Amino acid sequence: MATNLAIDDQLVEDARLIGSHRTKKAAVTEALIEYIQRRKQVEIIHLFGTIEYEPDYNYKEQRKVK
């Protein structure tokens, strides 16, 4: 998909050099992948503490079930 974007050339060049990417496209693609991964991690972090477990649940007992 061809897309025209007005992106700061210096930012793209810095990302390309830091990431050792040969092309601007590779640098932008990698940056988008990392951005998406981090946003998904934040969503997961918000789940911490929201799951309630049964106080008498014995996870070791499940290991015995065959």
Image (cartoon, grey):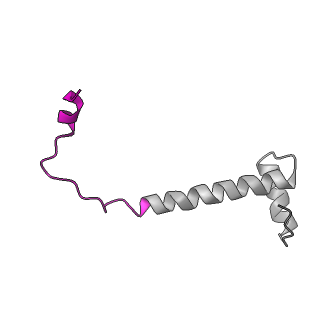
What span is colored magenta in the figure? 45-66
For the residue pair 21 and 33, the one nearer the viewer reads as: 33
Q: Is residue 20 left or right of residue 63?
A: right
Q: Magenta includes 57?
A: yes
What is the count of numbered marks? Answer: 0
Q: In the displayed structure, would residue 66 be above or below residue 38? A: above
Q: Nearer the viewer, residue 16 or 47?
A: 47
State the image coordinates of residue 33 (x, y, percent, origin top left): 67, 54
Specify the quadrant that holds the C terminus.
top left
Query: Which one is in front, 12 or 37?
Result: 37
Quarter of the figure that contains the N terminus = bottom right
Residue at horizontal 29 percent and vertical 59 percent from the top: 51
Coordinates of residue 50 in the picture (x, y in percent): 31, 63
Residue 36 picture quarter: bottom right
Q: Position of residue 18 (x, y in %)?
A: 77, 50
Q: Residue at x 87, y 69 (%)?
A: 4
Q: Residue at x 53, y 59 (%)?
A: 40
Q: Is residue 34 above or below residue 20?
A: below
> Left or right of 26: which side holds 39?
left
Res. 15 image quadrant: bottom right
Taking the view exactly as shown, the residue that stands out farthest to the bottom is 6
Predominant secondary structure in magenta? Answer: loop
* Identity of the residue furthest to the left in this view: 56
Q: Is residue 4 left or right of residue 55?
A: right
Would residue 16 be counted in the magenta stretch? no
> Residue at image x 57%, y 58%?
38
